[in-house]
Image (cartoon, grey):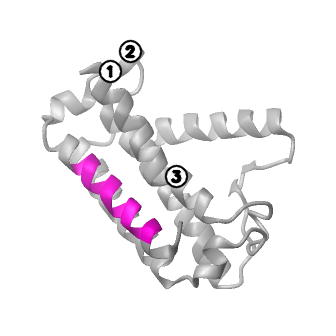
Amino acid sequence: MNKFELLGEMSKANEEMEEFLATLTETEMADPGPGGDWSVKDTLAHITAWMNLAAGWLEKTINGELVTRYQPGYELTGNEVEDEAIMNRLNDHIFAAHKDMPAAAIMAAYRQAGERLTAVVATMIEEDLLEPGRLDWFPEQPVWLNIAGNSFWHIRDHLAAFQESV
């Protein structure tokens, strides 16, 4: 995947999500999701938070600052089991922080996060996106995989779950 393709997939996934959201009322966005858990609005807040995390990591990298993944208080340890538990705690924190926000505010934040992540990716040189080990906080793989995982793969994964439940 090159930079142009990466940006294209990010844009397409955002369009797919926007099309889905346009079919829902604010009440439907707040209804429990598949399995009786997160609503569409909760899931959108979750996706938004992860896009903002990814954008922040990239912005810090560009500015020569130290990157903490995931964020202070939720730092990776290098132990796969512990790191999954940390990610789950962070997801619970994200849910709690956004559960009372109105759907319109979450949708606006989602759009802003998508624009932010797209803008930072657009400024990056292709080698930094495609070559493994270019960024010290994502040393073993090309960073485009992290971007995809926090944008279009993430969006489509959650979107598919909601579309299957309708």
- Kindly state the secondary structure of the residue where label 3 is placed: helix
Q: Are marks 1 and 3 in contact (CB under 8 Å)?
A: no
Q: Is residue 124 left or right of residue 127?
A: left
Work out which quarter of the rendered image holds the C terminus and state it: top left
Q: Which residue is mark 1?
A: 32
The residue lying at 55 percent from left, 51 percent from top is 149
Number of marks drawn: 3
- Kindly state the secondary structure of the residue where label 1 is placed: loop
CA–CA distance between discs 1 and 2?
5 Å
Any part of residue 98 in sight: no
Q: Position of residue 107 (x, y in %)?
A: 27, 51
Q: Position of residue 71 (x, y in %)?
A: 67, 56
Q: Earlier in the sequence, mark 1 or mark 3?
A: 1
Q: Residues within 10 Å of mark 1 (few under 14, many from 20)?
A: some
Q: Are marks 1 and 2 in contact (CB under 8 Å)?
A: yes
Indicate the amino acid at tag 2: Gly
The residue lying at 15 percent from left, 35 percent from top is 24
Q: Nearer the viewer, residue 137 or 101?
A: 137
Marking on residue 36: 2
Q: Is residue 131 left or right of residue 158?
A: right
CA–CA distance between discs 3 and 2?
22 Å
CA–CA distance between discs 1 and 3?
21 Å
Q: Is residue 100 above or below residue 37?
A: below
State which region is magenta. 5-18
Indicate the amino acid at tag 3: Trp
